[in-house]
Structures are given as C-alpha cells and as structure tokens.
Amino acid sequence: MFKHILVPVDGSSTASQATGTAIAIAEAFKSAVTVIYVIDPYAFTGVGTDFSYGQAEYLGAATSEANEAIKVAKQAFLEHGITVTASIVEGHAIYRGILEAAKSVGADLIVMSSHGRRGLEKLVLGSVTAQVLSHAHLPVLVVRD
C-alpha cells in the first residue's frame, strides 16, 4: 500500500517515536524510506547586517544538528533492514520543505511528529505539522508526544 515513506526528523524524542512508527509501517509494506531534516537557511532575513555573523554560526549549528538527527534515524531503519536514504533539505518555510521533498522523492505517505503545543505557545511558534496537514496532497500520519 505504501511504497515510499517520507520521515521528517528534528532530533526530538517525539521525532524518534515517529521513526519507530514509520519502521513498523515500512516493515509491513516493504516500503522504501526517505529521512529528511529541513533547515531554514534564511532564519536571519530582515534582521539587518549586524546578524550576518550570527547567520553563519546558525547554519553551522543547524547543519551539525541535522546530521546527527539524520544519522540516528537512518541507523534505526538500517537496524531493521529497511532501505533508507537521507538528506538535509533547505526551505524558508519548514512545511514547504517537507512537502517539496515528498513530491521530489515520490512519497505516498508522510510520517511525522507533533509536539502537541497548545495555547499561546502554539500561536507564537505555529505548527509545522498543522501546515503540512493543511497543504498535503498525500496521507500524513501524525505521531503525538
């Protein structure tokens, strides 16, 4: 039923739970898996030239964090004998990066986590998961913390 699963990760324990769910689905359907980590390379856009040094440090730290999260997730899939590819994706809007990656790899399912933010925190921070759900043209399985 699901030939290719996209699993966006962010290094959190909730993303690890989503990875476990994706492993179970991939084993059941013999699915290929793509793991991605989306980095917003323009996080400092519009805040002035004083932050250009900070942007370089941010990109370095974000890339390091992304590599570690991908390594952990990829290893989990490989331990179960599941074919997995992984990459860092850049996107000004994280949800768009996820959806564009899903389209480019031909995914027919996205398995991702939701951090369950509520109230003011959700209003201020937004929800990548909610945006993916709103704009996706393929099934999305949300794993809650």
Image (tube, grey):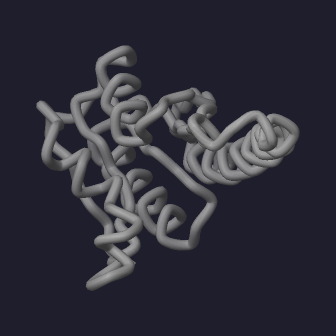
Quadrant of residue 124 within the rendered picture:
bottom left
Quadrant of residue 78 within the rendered picture:
top right
The quarter of the image holding the C terminus is bottom left
In the rendered image of this protein, does residue 131 appear above or below residue 16? above
- Count all numbered tags in the image, as a single digit: 0
Residue 35 on image: x %, y %:
52, 38
Quadrant of residue 143 within the rendered picture:
bottom left
In the rendered image of this protein, does residue 137 appear above or below residue 62? above
Q: Residue at x 25, y 38 (%)?
A: 109
Residue 123 on image: x %, y %:
29, 71
Q: Horizontally, is 142 left or right of 72 in the view?
A: left
Q: Horizontally, is 24 left or right of 52 in the view?
A: left
Residue 112 on image: x %, y %:
36, 54
Residue 1 on image: x %, y %:
15, 34
Q: Residue at x 82, y 45 (%)?
A: 54
Q: Is 37 or 130 nearer to us in this picture?
A: 130
Q: Residue at x 59, y 35 (%)?
A: 45
Q: Horizontally, is 82 left or right of 113 in the view?
A: right
Q: Is 65 or 68 nearer to us in this picture?
A: 65
Q: Residue at x 56, y 72 (%)?
A: 13
